Image (tube, grey):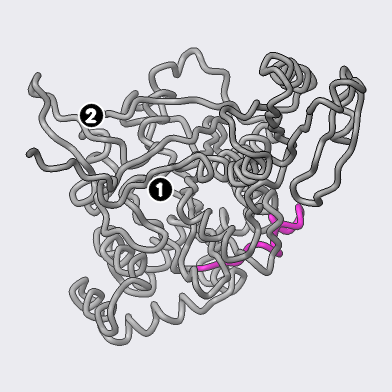
């Protein structure tokens, strides 16, 4: 006898049964509606890309340790996409002479990374990607942060639930070089340690900085930098381009009232190598989700990898569905199963022909109400139980008595209230 095939999905991936998909469609629907209100256009791209696309600018951890890649039958080296930003940069570069800049795009692809599965991290996830190309000024950075905040607010969140931590890669490099008297390579090594500090064991952070050549005094100065507010930090290096960018950014955030969601955080570096200016991460303030949910920033050199000296400035962020689900659950912002738009099931009675029930369902569908006819011969109570378990909000009763009077009854499964309406006007019972 052959061994049975496993029913569990591949480690770090998930199955989505219909009830799970209803929740996913709800929160992706919120995302799409918000982004469309902000006039972003949706795009897509392939699951497979050349591995070199990620090796060029994604950083050692992502490209070297977390990317699924292989040699195909033609000798090529494709990778299963671990992120979407390199793909969208390639798309922009491919039609750089046709696009009407600036452009505002978004996508919701599924991505794969060979990570150790844990709370908030899986090997497959869906990620909202939002990007602006062709605007080099701070307006784009401000709008991207505004967009991130609006997505959170769309779910009913407020400033007590999340915070946007903002920094600047140029300022970080200049401040570290000044405080620690190191060159560009030294600053890059320090940035890796700072970016990973929250994930390190006690003492590991200091050891990493010592390896980068820092003295005890320089480590202390670096800690002092991390405790400064934005105005104090800017005053430290007024001639830095990064300081000027930070100043303009926070002035814009204050002008729009977004500063109540934002704070300066020197330690936000972002591990990906392509970020060049503004960087930010959105943190869940619930203690059980004590990590950054998502983040992004400015990457002005990425499109140039494809087109040489024809630079196109870009700024954007990526937002994973796993951390979103955790956020919604911990703050009780997700709807209970069955909430939302009406969805009806026409119950079956022995004295009522199936065709009559099907006509009732067609009438409701014609009014924009999703509707199904129960299939089978269960008792009425079992049919209602089935409808409730499957996420239907209402049931329609059309037995012999209703048929003789030319009406149907509509029962709300949440309130248990029944309403009666004449045939041809059934939708009135759902108001």
Quick check: can you spot residue 315?
Answer: no
Q: Left or right? Give the position of 380 relative to 131.
A: right
Q: Secondary structure at mark 2?
A: strand
Of residue 193 and residue 429, the one placed in the foreground of this image is 429
Q: Earlier in the sequence, mark 1 or mark 2?
A: 2
- The spot of residue 22 in percent (x, y) is 57, 41
Quadrant assignment for the N terminus: top left
For label 1, count other residues whose C-alpha is less than 10 Å away and answer few (under 14), some (14-19) or many (20+): many
Q: Is residue 221 above or below residue 92?
A: below
In the rendered image, which residue does mark 2 sit on? 50
| Residue at x-position 43% and y-position 63% | 172
In the rendered image, which residue does mark 1 sit on? 275
Q: Is residue 199 above or below residue 53?
A: below
Residue 254 lies in the magenta-colored region: yes
Residue 26 lies in the magenta-colored region: no
Q: The magenta stretch spans which residues?
A: 252-265
Q: Determine the residue located farthest toward the front in the rendered image.
A: 351
Of residue 179 and residue 277, the one placed in the foreground of this image is 277
The picture quadrant where one finds residue 425 is top right
Of residue 117 and residue 415, the one placed in the foreground of this image is 415
Q: Nearer the viewer, mark 1 or mark 2?
A: 2
The picture quadrant where one finds residue 355 is top right
Disc 1/disc 2 C-alpha distance (Å) = 21 Å
- The spot of residue 305 in percent (x, y) is 31, 31
| Residue at x-position 30% and y-position 51% | 12
Q: Is residue 315 above or below residue 328?
A: above
Quadrant assignment for the C terminus: top right
- The spot of residue 380 in percent (x, y) is 68, 39
Quick check: can you spot residue 409?
Answer: yes
């Amino acid at each position: 006898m052959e061994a049975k095939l496993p029913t569990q999905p591949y480690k770090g991936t998930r199955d989505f049964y219909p009830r799970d998909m209803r929740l996913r469609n709800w929160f992706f629907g919120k995302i799409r509606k918000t982004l469309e209100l902000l006039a972003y256009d949706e795009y897509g791209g392939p699951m497979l890309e050349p591995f070199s696309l990620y090796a060029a600018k994604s950083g050692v951890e992502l490209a070297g340790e977390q990317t699924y890649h292989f040699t195909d039958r033609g000798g090529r080296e494709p990778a299963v996409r671990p992120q979407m930003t390199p793909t969208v940069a390639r798309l922009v570069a491919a039609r750089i002479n046709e696009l009407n800049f600036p452009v505002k795009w978004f996508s919701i692809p599924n991505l794969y990374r060979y990570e150790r599965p844990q709370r908030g991290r899986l090997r497959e996830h869906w990620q909202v990607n939002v990007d602006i190309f062709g605007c080099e000024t701070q307006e784009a950075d401000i709008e991207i942060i505004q967009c991130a905040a609006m997505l959170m607010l769309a779910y009913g969140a407020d400033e007590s639930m999340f915070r946007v931590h903002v920094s600047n890669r140029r300022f970080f490099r200049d401040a570290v070089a000044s405080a620690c008297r190191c060159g560009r390579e030294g600053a890059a090594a320090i940035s890796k340690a700072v970016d990973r500090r929250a994930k390190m064991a006690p003492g590991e952070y200091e050891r990493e900085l010592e390896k980068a050549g820092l003295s005890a005094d320089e480590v202390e100065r670096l800690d002092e930098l991390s405790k400064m507010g934005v105005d104090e930090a800017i005053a430290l290096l007024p001639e830095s381009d990064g300081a000027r960018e930070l100043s303009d950014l926070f002035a814009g955030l204050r002008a729009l009232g977004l500063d109540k969601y934002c704070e300066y955080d020197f330690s936000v570096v972002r591990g990906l190598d392509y970020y060049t200016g503004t960087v930010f991460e959105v943190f869940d303030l619930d203690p059980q989700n004590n990590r950054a949910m998502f983040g992004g920033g400015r990457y002005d050199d990425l499109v140039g990898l494809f087109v040489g000296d024809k630079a196109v400035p870009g700024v954007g962020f990526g937002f994973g569905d796993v951390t979103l689900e955790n956020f919604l659950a911990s703050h009780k912002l997700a709807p209970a199963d069955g909430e939302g738009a009406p969805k009806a099931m026409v119950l079956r009675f022995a004295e009522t022909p199936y065709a009559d029930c099907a006509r009732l369902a067609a009438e409701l569908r014609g009014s924009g109400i999703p509707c199904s006819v129960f299939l089978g011969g269960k008792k009425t109570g079992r049919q209602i139980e089935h409808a409730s378990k499957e996420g239907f909000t209402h049931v329609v009763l059309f037995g012999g008595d209703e048929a003789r009077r030319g009406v149907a009854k509509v029962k709300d499964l949440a309130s248990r209230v029944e309403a009666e309406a004449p045939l041809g006007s059934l939708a009135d019972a759902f108001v």
